[in-house]
Amino acid sequence: MFKSVNGILHVEDVSVTELAEKLGTPLYITSKSKLESNLKAYKDAFPEAGLLYAVKANNNLSIMRIIAKKGFGADVFSAGELYMAMLSGFKPEKILFNGNSKSDEEIRMGIRTGVKFSVDSIDELYSISEIAVEEGKEVDIAFRINPAIDPKTHPKIATGLRTSKFGIPWENVLDAYRLALELPNVIPVGIHCHIGSQITELSPFVEALNRLFDIAVKLEEMGIEVKFLDLGGGLGIDYEGKGAPTPKDFAKAIMPVFEKRCRELKSKPELWLEPGRSIVGDTTILLTRVNAVKRSYKNFVAVDAGFNLLIRPAMYGAYHRVAVANKMDMPAEEVYTIVGPICESGDVLAEDRKLPKVEKGDLIAIFDAGAYGFVMSSQYNGRPRCAEVLVDGSNWFVIRERESFYDLIGKQVIPDFLL
Ligand SMILES: *Cc1c(COP(=O)(O)O)cnc(C)c1O
């Protein structure tokens, strides 16, 4: 899906140099067939599971539409994500409303839309029950547990540690279910956890799944029918070219445990998963043009995209593979550090990479930018956000237009006395 043709990087059958000439840079470019093959990999590996795409990874409407059309549900973390998920065609009964700090307005919108809730606190449980009564609706809920598991990933994306802000400590969660049984209009039907992101060791998932079953057994004793066990998302992708588990490997690790432990239960719950990164991460490149090459403390390559468009390197020290997109056949000669245009020394996209000789005007492709890329972008330093393009074979479509200066000031209001 990403290949070199006569030394030029192509996304499917479209040359990125042509896209850059027609549309300008920077540009996010997504391969539709790569996205579809990732969706298929999950469906093949987990034919019976409930697959909910984690909207926060990439909320472009066209991309989400492709995902929704393949029958995926959605995991949303805010009313805004719920709005976008509904617009993209996800079915409300296949949407789980997550979040550790939902406002009453968000809860009401979720209830009116008819989605299920992952409940993160007792306060939230009371709010949902009260609002559900007001709305005259019954709401299916799961509690998000804090399983106290180390997912062995970057600390900022480990979400199931005992110290994390998410979920209800698993040791106390039975009390929460008991309360849910007493409160009107909330029906406990599932258990939810999400231990972290970019996880490349599978044993923490097995540990978390066992935790869910331990609780499910107790819930059945309390008379609750457990309809789903939601193991969350978090499967890592191969940013560094060192290999990462596939959905198939993931299934091999967890499905035997799932089948075995289901025998302890009277009912057979569905397994739910909430992949984000492993659906969209490797579908997309960020294409950026070189404005200047400078020999200083290091060989700096200054490009037109920075942490305003891809914050992962600055925020998580993340590694993204890079290539000189118009010199794919040339031998790597020199070591370069790729930096963005932002007025911060932390604006480094890739450090000490051996690349073909880089010159002003060259194009740099940053790979695996489809997850937590555009969604985390900002207008910092007065930079309008870039466009997004979807490639399908030899066709391409602008799926988000480049912002203009007007978008920088769009919602600002100058009080009369300053005019
Ligand atoms: C972020 C998140 C996901 C998706 O995580 P990935 O690592 O992108 O797969 C799933 N579920 C919840 C609750 C999340 O917060």
Image (spheres, rainbow, N blue to C red):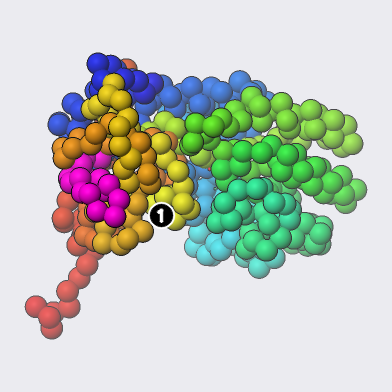
Q: Position of residue 119 (x, y in %)?
A: 65, 56
Residue 92 location, quadrant: top right
Residue 247 location, quadrant: top right
**Which image quarter is the C terminus in?**
bottom left
Helix, strand or loop at disc 1? helix
Q: Which stretch is magenta?
A: 287-306
Q: Position of residue 216 (x, y in %)?
A: 82, 45
**Which image quarter is the N terminus in?**
top left
Q: Nearer the viewer, residue 159 or 74?
A: 159
Residue at screen point 35% across, 52% down: 348
Q: Position of residue 64 (x, y in %)?
A: 43, 36
At label 1, the amino acid type is: Ala
Residue 230 lies within the magenta run:
no
Crowding around mark 1 (Cα neighbors within 10 Å: few <14, some 14 to 19, many 20+) is some
Relative placement, left or right, of 140 versus 22 is: right
Name the residue tied to disc 1: 314
Q: How many marks?
A: 1
